[in-house]
Image (cartoon, grey):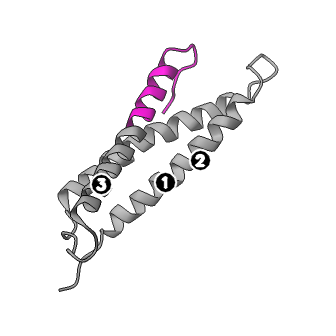
């Protein structure tokens, strides 16, 4: 019996999520070094809006990935692949990572919602 992998949709969403997280991490460091906005310096708005929009999109992607994952469950692991405690630990780590990414996106949105700059999606 051959095990089935994840669907193509789940794989694409997974890698889109990974690349977006990496981009948001790097762009946040870069954005903090930009000078504060003034009448002469208006270029800061675009990177911040892009960062916010990608963060909001990540929440949507995570929800889509969870839907795909719960709707199309993968084949159970083969008993020779890993010990049961390792499988449980892998599942717990995935849940923790998705929970943390979702929490960071939500807290990022909440912190930006309480500034004078609006979020335009």
Q: Say which residue label 2 marks.
A: 23
Q: Is residue 33 above or below residue 13?
A: above
Query: Is 82 colored magenta in this rendering?
Result: no
Q: Say which residue label 1 marks.
A: 18
Q: Which mark is residue 42?
A: none
The percent coordinates of residue 7 (x first, y second) are 30, 68
Decide which of 80, 30 is in the foreground and name it. 80
**Label 3 crowding class (10 Å Cα cut-off): few <14, some 14-19, many 20+?**
few
Element marked by disc 1:
helix
Element marked by disc 2:
helix
The percent coordinates of residue 20 (x first, y second) are 52, 49
Give me the residue at 22% from left, 67% from top. 74
Give me the residue at 32% from left, 53% from top. 65
Q: In terms of sequence position, does the residue under pointer 3 or pointer 1 come before the other?
A: 1
Q: In terms of sequence position, does the residue under pointer 1 or pointer 2 come before the other?
A: 1
Can residue 14 be seen?
A: yes
Distance between the Cα atoms at labels 2 and 3? Answer: 27 Å
Mark in the foreground, 3 or 1: 3
Can residue 64 be seen?
A: no
Give me the residue at 23% from left, 79% from top. 3
| Most frequent secondary structure within the magenta stretch | helix
Do the CB atoms of the residues marked 1 and 2 lie less than 8 Å apart?
Answer: no
Query: Is 120 colored magenta in this rendering?
Result: yes
Q: Say which residue label 3 marks.
A: 89
**Label 2 crowding class (10 Å Cα cut-off): few <14, some 14-19, many 20+?**
few
Distance between the Cα atoms at labels 3 and 1? Answer: 20 Å
Range of the magenta residues? 102-121
The percent coordinates of residue 82 (x first, y second) are 28, 70
């Amino acid at each position: 019996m051959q095990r089935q992998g994840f669907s193509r949709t789940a794989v694409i969403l997974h890698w889109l999520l990974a690349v977006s997280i990496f981009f948001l991490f790097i762009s946040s460091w870069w954005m903090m070094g930009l000078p504060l906005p003034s009448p002469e310096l208006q270029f800061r708005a675009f990177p911040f809006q892009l960062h916010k929009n990608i963060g909001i999109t990540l929440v949507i992607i995570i929800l889509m990935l969870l839907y795909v994952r719960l709707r199309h469950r993968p084949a159970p692991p083969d008993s020779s692949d890993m010990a049961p405690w390792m499988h449980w630990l892998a599942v717990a780590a995935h849940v923790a990572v998705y929970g943390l990414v979702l929490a960071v996106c939500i807290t990022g949105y909440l912190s930006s919602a309480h500034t004078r700059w609006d979020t335009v999606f």
